Structures are given as C-alpha cells and as structure tokens.
Image (spheres, rainbow, N blue to C red):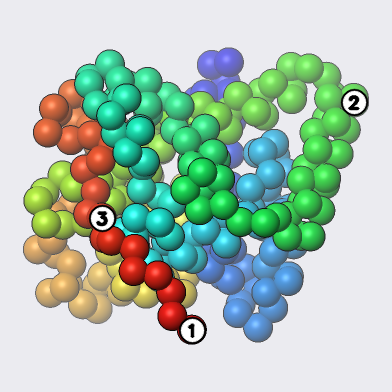
Amino acid sequence: MILAYCFGGVVNHSLMLAIHEIAHNMGFGPKYPMYNKLLGMFANLPIGLPFSVTFKHYHLEHHRYQGDEKLDTDIPTYVEAKLFNSTFGKFIWVLLQPFFYALRPMFVYPKNPTALEIISVVIQLAFNYWVYLYLGTKVITYMLAGSLMAMGLHPVAGHFISEHYMFHKGYETYSYYGPLNFITFNVGYHNEHHDFPFVPGSKLPQVKKIAPEFYDNLPQHHSWTSVLYDFIMDPSIGPYARIKRKHKGLKF
C-alpha cells in the first residue's frame, strides 16, 4: 500500500494527465480523433478504472462552459457543499474525491453511454481480469489502490483543488509553476491552459514566457500540498468556493 501511494499513485496520476492531454487531441493531433481516443484507452489500462472516453465528453464542456451550474460537472453539488463543509468534512471529501468525480456527472448532467464508452469498459475489465489471473490479487490491488489514492489526499492531487477553487475572491482559475509540472504535463499552467486549451502542455511555459504581463501578476499557488492543507483547515474555503454561473440553456 505504501508503494501504491508513493510510486504507483504518482505514475497513475501522471497517466491520468496524459489522458487529459489526449482529450485535447494532443496525441495524434486534431485530424485523427479516433487515434487519440484509442491512445487514451491504452494509457488508461494501468489505471484500472475506465474513464478516458467519458472524461473527454465532460472535460471539453468544462472548458466551453466553465462555471455553468449544469454543464460544468467539475463544480461540486449543493449536497457536497452542505455535507462536507467542516474541517473534518473537507478531509473526508478530499479522500473521496475520485468517487465524487466519477459519480457527480451521472447525477448533475447524465448522458447516454456511447458505443465507444461501452467498448472501453469491456477492454478495461478484460485487462483487469488478465492482470488478476496471471499476476495475482496484489498486483490488481496495487493498480486500483494507486489510482484511488492518487486522486484523493495525495500531493499530486492538489491540482484538482488548486485549479478553480476561489482562494482569492474574484479569481476562478489559478496556475502553479512548481516542480510537479514535470510529471503532470504542465497542468499547473492552468490559466495558460484555459486561455489556449489546444496548445500542448509542453508548450505552456512558452506561452507564459511570451506574455508575462497576462500571467505574472495573477494569484498563483506555490505548493499543491499547501493547497490541500489550506483547503481543509481554512474555514473560508470549501467545496462550494467556486465561481458559479446560472445555466441559461443551449441555443443551436
């Protein structure tokens, strides 16, 4: 379990952020969407939890409709805010983050599963069964535990909270320029990423360098571990410390 937390968790979280890059068509480029989806499914295998195809459907809408109370499923629900608003409650909420991220879209903005999503689930379950059959219980437990712990109370998982929780009133997106960017595809450059969602993570430091007047003076985080600590201990911050916009419906 220690290895799953310290090593497997870091590797699996890095793979999750590789899938994030692939969701923006950074694998084979925008001309080959199916190749990108297949690459995402392949990167998903060691994680053990099939999410790459579904993640893309919801994540791109997070970019397009950031803060929308219905379409941005990155925003915690009212129930989460009420139940997990104390210091102890926020600690539990952070531990359970992977479950909230997985289940929240089904309640807030459910979508019918696509054929590719079903195929991805079948492939992942078949891979998990193969691991269990030929490598044993410990290995499959290591895979799944690493993924679940890496999304909860884990230094790398601090980016989930650092990105959009309102640590400074009126600012809804924050960047982090520390060393963990080396294993997370520069996801810490989050203001830059939201300004240019189809620029690869490897190029985001150049975006900041080219236009420092737009980024240097914005509030930023210096440690994802500190973000987790401050989120749990500061009574002024909680699951609902987000800028939220009324859903006005979609017009086609």
Q: Position of residue 2 (x, y in %)?
A: 54, 16
Upstream in the sequence, badge 3 or badge 1? 3
Q: Position of residue 147 (x, y in %)?
A: 58, 33
Residue 66 vertical placement versus 81 (above, below): below
Q: Residues within 10 Å of mark 2 (few under 14, many from 20)?
A: few
Residue 42 in the figure: left or right of residue 239 = right
Q: CA distance from mark 2 to mark 1?
A: 51 Å
**Which is more toward the observer, 39 or 106?**
106
What amino acid does circle 2 point to?
Tyr
Upstream in the sequence, badge 3 or badge 2? 2
User: Between tags 2 and 1, which lies in front?
Assistant: 1
Q: Position of residue 244 (x, y in %)?
A: 25, 55
Mark 2 — residue?
134
Mark 3 — residue?
244
Disc ID at residue 252: 1
- Secondary element at image label 1: loop
Q: Are marks 3 and 1 in contact (CB under 8 Å)?
A: no
Residue 189 vertical placement versus 34 (above, below): above
What amino acid does circle 3 point to?
Lys
Q: Which residue does the image show at 56% across and 45% down from the upper left? A: 106
Q: Residues within 10 Å of mark 1 (few under 14, many from 20)?
A: few
Upstream in the sequence, badge 2 or badge 1? 2
